Image (spheres, helix red, strand yellow):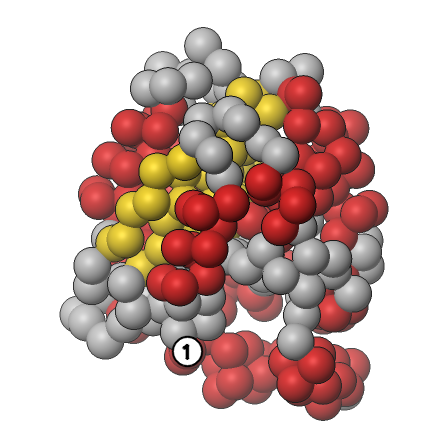
Protein backbone atom coordinates (compact mmCIF):
# COMPACT_ATOMS: atom_id res chain seq x y z
CA UNK A 1 0.00 0.00 0.00
CA UNK A 2 1.30 3.45 -0.90
CA UNK A 3 2.88 5.25 2.08
CA UNK A 4 1.28 8.47 3.32
CA UNK A 5 3.54 11.45 4.05
CA UNK A 6 2.09 14.29 6.13
CA UNK A 7 3.45 17.85 6.27
CA UNK A 8 2.28 19.90 9.28
CA UNK A 9 1.42 23.59 9.45
CA UNK A 10 3.60 26.39 10.77
CA UNK A 11 4.93 25.68 14.29
CA UNK A 12 3.27 22.27 14.34
CA UNK A 13 4.55 18.69 14.33
CA UNK A 14 3.09 15.19 14.03
CA UNK A 15 0.74 15.86 16.96
CA UNK A 16 -1.32 17.97 14.53
CA UNK A 17 -2.30 14.78 12.68
CA UNK A 18 -2.72 12.48 15.69
CA UNK A 19 -6.30 11.38 14.77
CA UNK A 20 -5.33 10.68 11.17
CA UNK A 21 -2.14 8.81 12.11
CA UNK A 22 -4.20 6.66 14.46
CA UNK A 23 -6.77 5.95 11.76
CA UNK A 24 -4.40 5.09 8.91
CA UNK A 25 -1.25 3.64 10.45
CA UNK A 26 -2.72 0.14 10.85
CA UNK A 27 -3.10 -0.22 7.08
CA UNK A 28 -0.25 1.77 5.53
CA UNK A 29 3.04 3.39 6.46
CA UNK A 30 2.37 6.91 7.75
CA UNK A 31 5.13 9.48 8.18
CA UNK A 32 5.21 13.12 9.23
CA UNK A 33 8.16 15.21 8.03
CA UNK A 34 9.47 18.28 9.90
CA UNK A 35 9.52 21.51 7.88
CA UNK A 36 11.52 23.89 10.05
CA UNK A 37 15.17 23.32 9.29
CA UNK A 38 15.61 25.78 6.40
CA UNK A 39 14.49 29.30 5.55
CA UNK A 40 13.26 28.71 1.99
CA UNK A 41 10.35 26.61 0.77
CA UNK A 42 12.61 25.13 -1.91
CA UNK A 43 15.12 23.82 0.64
CA UNK A 44 12.37 22.51 2.91
CA UNK A 45 10.84 20.58 0.01
CA UNK A 46 14.21 19.19 -1.05
CA UNK A 47 14.79 17.86 2.46
CA UNK A 48 11.35 16.23 2.47
CA UNK A 49 12.20 14.48 -0.79
CA UNK A 50 15.60 13.32 0.48
CA UNK A 51 13.90 11.42 3.29
CA UNK A 52 10.67 10.32 1.60
CA UNK A 53 9.84 6.95 0.05
CA UNK A 54 10.33 6.67 -3.69
CA UNK A 55 6.58 7.02 -4.29
CA UNK A 56 4.06 8.32 -1.75
CA UNK A 57 0.74 10.03 -1.15
CA UNK A 58 1.35 13.57 0.10
CA UNK A 59 -0.90 15.62 2.38
CA UNK A 60 -0.05 19.04 3.81
CA UNK A 61 -1.95 21.50 5.97
CA UNK A 62 -1.38 25.27 5.82
CA UNK A 63 2.39 25.81 5.50
CA UNK A 64 2.65 22.06 5.04
CA UNK A 65 0.46 22.44 1.96
CA UNK A 66 2.71 25.21 0.66
CA UNK A 67 5.74 22.94 1.04
CA UNK A 68 3.76 20.07 -0.52
CA UNK A 69 3.16 22.15 -3.64
CA UNK A 70 6.91 22.78 -3.90
CA UNK A 71 7.56 19.06 -3.43
CA UNK A 72 5.15 18.55 -6.33
CA UNK A 73 7.04 21.10 -8.42
CA UNK A 74 10.36 19.37 -7.76
CA UNK A 75 9.26 15.73 -8.15
CA UNK A 76 5.71 15.28 -9.42
CA UNK A 77 6.53 11.80 -10.69
CA UNK A 78 7.00 10.57 -7.11
CA UNK A 79 3.62 11.76 -5.81
CA UNK A 80 0.86 9.17 -6.15
CA UNK A 81 -1.79 11.57 -4.80
CA UNK A 82 -1.97 15.06 -3.33
CA UNK A 83 -4.10 16.44 -0.50
CA UNK A 84 -4.02 20.18 0.21
CA UNK A 85 -5.66 21.24 3.47
CA UNK A 86 -6.33 24.82 4.59
CA UNK A 87 -3.54 26.24 2.46
CA UNK A 88 -2.71 28.80 -0.21
CA UNK A 89 -1.14 28.35 -3.69
CA UNK A 90 -0.33 32.05 -4.13
CA UNK A 91 2.74 34.10 -3.30
CA UNK A 92 2.50 36.06 -0.07
CA UNK A 93 0.64 39.36 -0.29
CA UNK A 94 2.72 42.47 0.53
CA UNK A 95 0.60 43.38 3.55
CA UNK A 96 0.97 39.89 5.04
CA UNK A 97 4.69 39.94 4.36
CA UNK A 98 5.01 43.31 6.11
CA UNK A 99 3.23 41.98 9.19
CA UNK A 100 5.79 39.21 9.62
CA UNK A 101 8.73 41.56 10.32
CA UNK A 102 7.47 42.75 13.75
CA UNK A 103 6.51 39.19 14.66
CA UNK A 104 10.00 37.98 13.82
CA UNK A 105 11.59 40.79 15.82
CA UNK A 106 9.39 39.95 18.80
CA UNK A 107 10.49 36.31 18.60
CA UNK A 108 14.15 37.34 18.41
CA UNK A 109 13.67 39.19 21.71
CA UNK A 110 12.19 36.19 23.49
CA UNK A 111 8.47 36.65 22.89
CA UNK A 112 7.54 33.55 20.90
CA UNK A 113 4.82 32.58 23.38
CA UNK A 114 3.23 36.04 23.16
CA UNK A 115 3.32 36.12 19.35
CA UNK A 116 1.76 32.68 19.05
CA UNK A 117 -0.84 33.11 21.77
CA UNK A 118 -1.98 36.65 21.01
CA UNK A 119 -1.43 37.14 17.28
CA UNK A 120 -1.64 33.79 15.57
CA UNK A 121 -3.33 30.85 17.27
CA UNK A 122 -6.63 32.58 18.25
CA UNK A 123 -7.32 33.17 14.56
CA UNK A 124 -7.03 29.47 13.74
CA UNK A 125 -10.03 27.92 15.46
CA UNK A 126 -13.81 28.16 15.57
CA UNK A 127 -15.48 28.68 18.93
CA UNK A 128 -16.48 25.44 20.57
CA UNK A 129 -16.03 23.23 23.61
CA UNK A 130 -12.78 21.75 22.30
CA UNK A 131 -11.13 25.03 21.37
CA UNK A 132 -9.15 25.39 24.59
CA UNK A 133 -7.58 21.95 24.42
CA UNK A 134 -6.66 22.36 20.76
CA UNK A 135 -5.16 25.78 21.41
CA UNK A 136 -3.13 24.36 24.30
CA UNK A 137 -1.81 21.60 22.03
CA UNK A 138 -0.91 24.11 19.31
CA UNK A 139 0.94 26.23 21.85
CA UNK A 140 2.81 23.19 23.16
CA UNK A 141 3.94 22.27 19.64
CA UNK A 142 5.06 25.84 18.94
CA UNK A 143 7.06 26.18 22.14
CA UNK A 144 8.69 22.79 21.65
CA UNK A 145 9.80 23.77 18.13
CA UNK A 146 11.17 27.09 19.34
CA UNK A 147 12.39 30.43 18.05
CA UNK A 148 14.59 29.35 15.16
CA UNK A 149 11.90 27.27 13.52
CA UNK A 150 9.53 30.25 13.71
CA UNK A 151 12.13 32.51 12.08
CA UNK A 152 12.98 29.95 9.38
CA UNK A 153 9.35 29.31 8.54
CA UNK A 154 8.44 33.00 8.50
CA UNK A 155 11.27 33.77 6.07
CA UNK A 156 10.28 30.84 3.86
CA UNK A 157 6.65 31.94 3.70
CA UNK A 158 7.60 35.52 2.87
CA UNK A 159 9.62 34.46 -0.18
CA UNK A 160 7.43 31.65 -1.49
CA UNK A 161 6.46 31.32 -5.14
CA UNK A 162 3.07 31.15 -6.83
CA UNK A 163 2.29 27.48 -7.53
CA UNK A 164 -0.85 27.73 -9.65
CA UNK A 165 0.89 26.42 -12.79
CA UNK A 166 2.26 23.48 -10.80
CA UNK A 167 -1.24 22.49 -9.70
CA UNK A 168 -2.64 22.90 -13.19
CA UNK A 169 -0.12 20.37 -14.51
CA UNK A 170 -0.73 17.62 -11.93
CA UNK A 171 -3.17 14.88 -12.94
CA UNK A 172 -2.99 12.60 -9.92
CA UNK A 173 -5.89 12.02 -7.53
CA UNK A 174 -6.18 15.15 -5.41
CA UNK A 175 -8.15 16.34 -2.41
CA UNK A 176 -8.68 20.01 -1.60
CA UNK A 177 -10.11 20.43 1.89
CA UNK A 178 -10.71 23.27 4.32
CA UNK A 179 -12.72 24.28 7.33
CA UNK A 180 -15.83 26.23 6.35
CA UNK A 181 -14.87 28.99 8.79
CA UNK A 182 -11.16 29.19 7.98
CA UNK A 183 -10.38 32.92 7.88
CA UNK A 184 -6.65 32.47 7.28
CA UNK A 185 -7.07 30.36 4.12
CA UNK A 186 -10.72 30.88 3.14
CA UNK A 187 -12.98 28.67 1.09
CA UNK A 188 -12.58 30.68 -2.13
CA UNK A 189 -8.85 29.91 -2.13
CA UNK A 190 -9.69 26.21 -2.08
CA UNK A 191 -12.21 26.60 -4.86
CA UNK A 192 -9.36 28.10 -6.88
CA UNK A 193 -7.11 25.09 -6.20
CA UNK A 194 -9.94 22.68 -6.99
CA UNK A 195 -10.42 24.43 -10.32
CA UNK A 196 -6.70 24.20 -11.10
CA UNK A 197 -6.23 20.51 -10.23
CA UNK A 198 -7.80 18.45 -13.04
CA UNK A 199 -8.46 15.33 -10.94
CA UNK A 200 -9.55 16.81 -7.61
CA UNK A 201 -12.35 16.59 -5.07
CA UNK A 202 -13.32 19.60 -2.92
CA UNK A 203 -14.39 18.97 0.68
CA UNK A 204 -15.59 21.76 3.00
CA UNK A 205 -15.69 20.76 6.67
CA UNK A 206 -18.47 22.47 8.63
CA UNK A 207 -17.88 23.83 12.14
CA UNK A 208 -14.13 24.00 11.59
CA UNK A 209 -11.60 26.76 11.06
CA UNK A 210 -7.96 26.44 10.06
CA UNK A 211 -7.30 23.12 11.81
CA UNK A 212 -10.07 20.69 10.80
CA UNK A 213 -7.76 17.73 11.41
CA UNK A 214 -8.24 18.44 15.13
CA UNK A 215 -11.47 20.46 15.19
CA UNK A 216 -13.47 17.87 13.21
CA UNK A 217 -11.20 14.83 13.11
CA UNK A 218 -13.88 12.33 12.13
CA UNK A 219 -15.10 14.26 9.10
CA UNK A 220 -11.58 15.16 8.01
CA UNK A 221 -10.27 11.62 8.36
CA UNK A 222 -13.23 10.30 6.37
CA UNK A 223 -12.47 12.75 3.54
CA UNK A 224 -8.83 11.70 3.53
CA UNK A 225 -9.87 8.04 3.50
CA UNK A 226 -12.02 8.62 0.41
CA UNK A 227 -9.02 10.25 -1.31
CA UNK A 228 -6.69 7.42 -0.32
CA UNK A 229 -9.08 4.84 -1.85
CA UNK A 230 -7.95 6.11 -5.28
CA UNK A 231 -4.23 5.70 -4.51
Residue 226 quadrant: top left
Element type where label 1 sits in the image:
helix
Q: Is residue 9 above or below residue 46?
A: below
* Disc 1: which residue: 123
Say whether residue 205 is left or right of residue 35.
Answer: left
At 62% from the left edge and 61% from the top edge, which residue is drawn?
90
Number of residues whose C-alpha sits closer than 10 Å to that of mark 1, classed few (under 14), some (14–19) or many (20 or more): some
Say whether residue 181 is left or right of residue 156.
Answer: left
Residue 153 at least partly seen: no
At 43% from the left edge and 18% from the top edge, which residue is drawn?
231
Q: Is residue 184 above or below residue 87?
A: below
Q: Nearer the viewer, residue 189 or 196?
A: 196
From the top left corner, tell me how far across and down residue 193 is, in percent: 48, 50
Q: How many marks?
A: 1
Q: Nearer the viewer, residue 28 or 22?
A: 28
Residue 114 quadrant: bottom right
Amino acid sequence: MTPLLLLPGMMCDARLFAPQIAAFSGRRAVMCAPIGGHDTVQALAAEVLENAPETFALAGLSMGGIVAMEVLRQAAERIAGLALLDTNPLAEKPEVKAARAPQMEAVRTGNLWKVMREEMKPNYLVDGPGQGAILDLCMAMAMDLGDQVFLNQSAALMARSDQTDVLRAYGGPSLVLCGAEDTLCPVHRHELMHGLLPNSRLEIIENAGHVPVLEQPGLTTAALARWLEDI
